[in-house]
């Protein structure tokens, strides 16, 4: 959702950014902004309560998509993605809130293409090219394959990483940022 948000910010506040780096952004194909994403409700059923960040880490470290993440990134996700709650911890972003965000992301009001087309700064779109099990829809790319062609000045790069590029390749992500 960060790529969608920063794209909107760049369109609404021209001059604020000198360029954009969009890492497999959740900007769908133009014709997919038709209504709620009904598969999002699985997120609302996520486990919310944990005894510790370590318990969360041990549960996730060998499960997709987390098994492909850099171990230090997964550790940070567990350490900082939980907040104390009584005698345990809960997710900082409650599952029902996150599900609502995902569910509404393809709504007609979320269609960002008019804003995309107004952006005049260089945009670097880096998309996931990793082919995953079709049943694993959270690991596949939500980015429109032709997204870059909708910006006035954009490059398009396809990587071998999944949708979770920064989590899988933090050093490479830092190189891309430094190159801007």
Image (cartoon, rainbow, N blue to C red):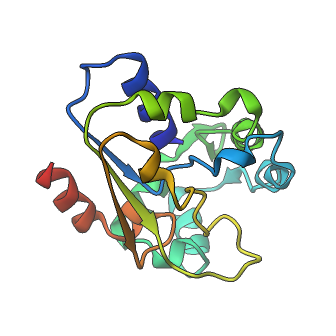
| Residue 104 sits above or below residue 176 on the image | above
Where residue 7 sits, quadrant-wise, is top left
Q: Which residue is depicted at the point 77% across and 42% down?
A: 103
Q: How many marks?
A: 0
- If the image is split into quadrants, where does the N terminus sit? top right
Foreground pick, 175 / 97: 175
Horizontally, residue 163 falls left or right of residue 36, namely left
Spot occupied by residue 179 in the image (x, y as percentages of width and height) = 12, 54
Q: Which residue is depicted at the point 64% across and 51% down?
A: 29
| Residue 114 sits above or below residue 160 on the image | above
Q: Which residue is depicted at the point 84% across and 50% down?
A: 41
Where residue 35 sits, quadrant-wise, is top right
Horizontally, residue 169 falls left or right of residue 45, namely left
Report whether residue 118 is seen: yes
Q: Which residue is depicted at the point 71% across and 74% down?
A: 136
Q: Residue furthest left?
A: 179
Spot occupied by residue 31 in the image (x, y as percentages of width and height) = 72, 47
Horizontally, residue 60 falls left or right of residue 12, namely right
Report whether residue 79 is seen: no
Spot occupied by residue 113 in the image (x, y as percentages of width and height) = 56, 35
Horizontally, residue 102 falls left or right of residue 1, namely right
| Residue 152 sits above or below residue 149 on the image | above
Spot occupied by residue 28 in the image (x, y as percentages of width and height) = 62, 50
């Amino acid at each position: 959702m960060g790529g969608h948000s920063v794209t909107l910010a760049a369109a609404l506040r021209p001059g604020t950014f000198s360029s954009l780096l969009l890492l497999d952004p959740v900007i769908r194909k133009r014709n997919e902004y038709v209504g709620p994403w009904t598969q999002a409700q699985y997120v609302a059923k996520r486990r919310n309560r944990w005894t510790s960040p370590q318990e969360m880490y041990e549960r996730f470290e060998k499960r997709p998509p987390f098994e492909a993440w850099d171990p230090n990134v997964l550790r940070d996700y567990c350490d900082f993605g939980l907040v104390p709650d009584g005698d345990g911890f809960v997710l900082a972003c409650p599952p029902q809130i996150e599900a609502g965000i995902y569910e509404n992301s393809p709504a007609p009001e979320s269609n960002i293409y008019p804003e995309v087309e107004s952006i005049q700064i260089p945009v670097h779109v880096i998309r996931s090219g990793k082919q995953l099990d079709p049943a694993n829809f959270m690991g596949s790319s939500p980015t429109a394959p032709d997204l870059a062609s909708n910006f006035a000045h954009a490059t398009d790069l396809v990587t071998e990483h999944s949708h979770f590029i920064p989590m899988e390749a933090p050093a490479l992500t830092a190189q891309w940022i430094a190159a801007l």
